[in-house]
Structures are given as C-alpha cells and as structure tokens.
Amino acid sequence: MDELIYFDYAATTPVRPEAAAAMMDALGQFGNPSSRYGYGREAARRVKEGRETVARALGCSPGEVYFTSCGTEGDNWALRRGAELGRRKGKHIVTTAVEHAAVLETCRDLERRGYEVTYLKPDRAGRITAGQVTAALRPDTALVSMMLVNNETGVLLPVAEAVRAVKAADKAVLFHTDAVQGFLKVPFPVCSTGADLITVSGHKIGAPKGIGALYVKKGVRLAPLLTGGGQEEGIRSGTEATGQIAAFAAAVAAALDDPKRLEKAAAVKEYALARLKAALPKLEVISAGDVGHICAVTLPGYKSEVVVRVLGDRNICISSGSACHKGRPSHVFAAMGLPKPWLDGALRLSFSPESTRAQADVLVSALKEAANSLFTTLS
Ligand code: PLP
C-alpha cells in the first residue's frame, strides 16, 4: 500500500499523540466524576482542568463551557433549545443555505414542528453579508444561526459583524454560530464574535471522535437537550466522557502552543493551489478559502466521486465536498449557483499544519494522471 497522503482534514484529523497519551492516562484513572470519594473527585478535577483549557481557547470562562458528544449534538442543542427559549417572541429562525447538515436538518425538523426558517443564499463566492442577516429579521425572529467557517469552501462568514448588527436591531434575538471548522483555525478566539451559543468539535483539532463542546454565554438560560443525572451543572446529563475530555483538552493545549499552525497550513494550501493550476489547465478554483485549511476546486467535465475513488485507490484522500454528503452533489456549491459541470467535478482539499509540500506534489501528479486517464476513458 502506498504511503497515506491525507488532504481531508476538514472531515477529521488524526488523534494527536498528546491527546492519545492524555486519554490513556484518564482512562486508567476510571473514576466517575460524580462520585463523592477521593478517586471520583480526582476524575472531577481532571474534567475541571479540561474545561479550563477549552475555555481558554474559546475565550470565555469555564462556567460557560458544556461538554457534548460531538458538533452535531451542540448544533442540535443550540437550535432546538435556543428556538424554544425565544418562543414567546415567535417561531421564526434565520440561518444560511450553506450550513452543515447538523444545522440544516435540525432546521428542517423544526419546520415540521411549526417553526418558519429563512435560509440566506450565498453569492457566487459563497459569501453572506451581515446586511442579509438583519434584512431577514422579523418581529417574531427568535434565533439566528450562522456558521463561522464553511466546511466546503473555507469561507469565513462575518459572524462578529452579524452579531453586532442583529443585537443592535433586536437584543432579544439569540445568536448561535457553528464554529466546528473555525475553532483554533481562525486567528481570534471564537467567543470574541459575541455569539450567545457556539458549537465546537474535538475531532477536527486532533482529539478523538466523540467529544465536543457548546459555549453558552453567561445569562442565557438554555434548557437541556438530554435530561438525566444532572451532570454539567444540570444542563447536559450523561456521565462525563473523562478520557475524551482529557484528550480534547490536550489537543487544544497543543494547538495553543503552536501559534504558527494557521500559517503553516495556509502555506501548503497556497503551494498546492498554485501547483494544481499550473499542472491542470482545466482546473478551476471554486474557493481559495479565507482560512488556512480549506479550499475547493473543480474539474468541469469530470465526476468528482470517480476522481476521489481513483485517488483513494492510491491511498490519497481528498473529498468531493463534506464527508457527510455520501455522493450527493454539495448543497453549498449548488446554493452558490455553480454550473452543473462545476458541481459534478467539485473537490475539497483540506490541510493541517503537518501537511507538507512533498505531499502536495504527490497529490498534484496523481490528480493530473487521474484527469488524463479518465479523460481518455470518457472520450
Ligand atoms: N458543523 C460543521 C461545520 C462540520 O464541518 C461538522 C463536521 O463535519 C459538524 C458540524 C458536525 O460535527 P461532528 O462530526 O463532531 O458531529
């Protein structure tokens, strides 16, 4: 088998050695943080320390961080209970057409439950303005949900500006942002956006799958999504996942210790894009991405699933969009109004600080070969 060449870091990331070590250590100390004896209190102390680390990275106080099982849970919790919290005001929600399925499918479910949802359309570059958000507000708007970084284009949405504009128009509207692709990938702490509710996920930053967090701004009285034993100050029941929490905190700390990480990923992305454009004259850039780790390109006339499979056979991992699409054309690129041949040939490339130029070279020559051989097959 060829060496693994991985350019799908937006789908998931390898577990960092620091995170794996912290997890093993925490799993060895298996106490239940709710137990009253010393062994349990030791587990509780580790959860507390993990929360402090995650809060430092988010830019908030530890009391505003609630551990969840994943980004999808955070999005569900924020939207379902956020919408409920504003119900006295009304049942209107504003979101964007480019959100992750965790937000869009939850909005669709809320529509079936009597809510009305406005889906803001992006422009051809995948951008949505703060003005579009405020223009969509109505007296009965309870909640706005706008992602921070799009997982398919790498576009940074103007969340801080939208929060300011929305709050200036109507203080009572709750603002949620899905920052799963923005957490530790943008050069500011995500809480500085001013959003009331913020979703993050561990497996995008070197923690294992199965851990995330929801930031709930102090004073926002969000009801629980899960009821039970009353862990996490009573609003997120379920015995704390001590191993995952320790790993999440270790991955966060490692990222904070590497202030150059964003530039490193961006440098390899820029290099790969330049090489791809030179090697494949047919290739078009859909979005170079505002963040260092994501960009989207297309090979019009090709089928991205086939290209992804051909590269996959050589152990080169890229994606045809979000890993969650499973072969369907991307709703993000469709919302941007891209022509069909662009949609069909769309590829997402995503990077990490550990990505190298040598790996990018392998990707470029494999993509060139795949394009040549598929072209011959197709014609
Ligand atoms: N939101 C965005 C923008 C994502 O990219 C993802 C995962 O791809 C999610 C939410 C869901 O996160 P998780 O996989 O932790 O459930």
Image (spheres, rainbow, N blue to C red):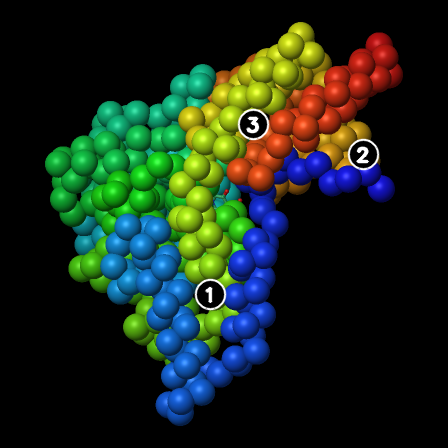
Label 1: element kind: helix
Q: Position of residue 49 (x, y in %)?
A: 37, 68
Residue topped by disc 3 = 268
Which residue appears at 84% of the width and 17% of the height? 373
Q: Identify residue for label 1.
A: 245
Q: Which amino acid does label 2 sit on?
A: Arg
Sequence-first disc among 3 and 2: 3
**Circle 2 residue:** 314
Point out the residue furthest to the top here. 281
C-alpha separation, residue under disc 1 versus residue under disc 2:
35 Å
- Residue farthest to the bottom, as pictured: 37
Please tell me which of labels 3 and 1 falls first in the chain: 1
Instruction: Name the residue: 18% across, 36% down.
Output: 164
In the image shown, does 369 or 333 lie closer to the viewer? 369
Point 26% across, 41% down: residue: 193
**Disc 2 residue: CB within 8 Å of ligand 1:** no
